[in-house]
Amino acid sequence: MEVTCSRCNQAVPEDSCFCPVCGLPQLVYSAENGGAEGQPERWNEAVRDASSVAWKPALRSALLLAIPAGIMSNMLSPFSIIGMPLMAIAGAWVVYLYMRNQKPAWITIGAGARIGLVTGILGGWSAAAATGVTLFAMRFWLHQGKFYDTLWQTLTQQMSQQWISMGVDAQTIAQMQQLLLPPEGRAAWLLGALSMLATLLLLFAVAGGAIGARLLARRRRPEI
């Protein structure tokens, strides 16, 4: 008996888990092995295939989008205010580009989240590296170190005023200033800020990848 796809009605080979035309996973019960227990053998194989990721094309797509998005999301970029949603869009877009070249074109939310994870790692590293390179260039190549030193002192004074309004005692504020004003304190604060930035970009990219996979799965969900 010829098996046809429930979506496009094209012929499907007996040993195939997916439609060769539209890529829809085919739900077929085996009377010998799975029919008595109601286990769809070919469906299980389809789900396992959709859960795995072909990392070579996925990495190509991630590199294409994650690095530019990360550079645009660095702390000194004028686009940093939209860095988080930009990375989420990049994660979803990477999943879309990955799926466009895959046969069958179907993916699970977990696989999309893993692709988003790789996208977020690349984007977070790119954002941190771009911030560091920009600060280094501004201080040592463009000789604007004094501007950043004055800016940091102003920010520290503003934080001190906020702490005073919150009822923090003067001794604690003085200790915090002693920690933040030296070069070591500034470096530690910047490292913490970059770590937080990379973490947020990572989380948004994972969410974007999962949402992208979910939307694609909804468009291509099996018709049982």
Image (cartoon, rainbow, N blue to C red):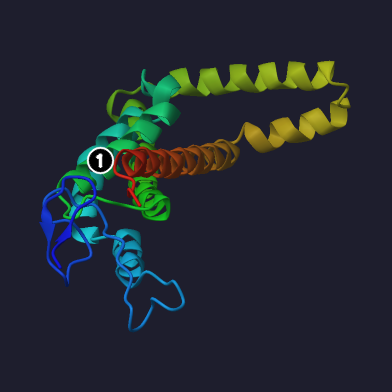
Q: Nearer the viewer, residue 132 or 224?
A: 224
Residue 36 visible from this viewpoint:
yes
Q: Residue at x 36, y 23 (%)?
A: 77
User: How far across and down, in percent of the image, does residue 120 sit?
Assistant: 39, 45
Q: Residue at x 31, y 52 (%)?
A: 107
Direction front: furthest residue:
1
Dividing the picture into quadrants, the one containing residue 13 is: bottom left
> Mark 1 = which residue?
96
Dividing the picture into quadrants, the one containing residue 179 is: top right
Question: Helix, strand or loop at disc 1?
Answer: helix
Q: Nearer the viewer, residue 12 or 165?
A: 12
Q: Relative to residue 114, is residue 73 depicted above or below?
A: above
Direction bottom: furthest residue:
32
Q: Quadrant of the N terminus?
A: bottom left
Q: Residue at x 19, y 55 (%)?
A: 104
Which amino acid lies under the numbered mark 1 shown in the image of this protein?
Tyr
| Left-right relation of 212 to 105 | right
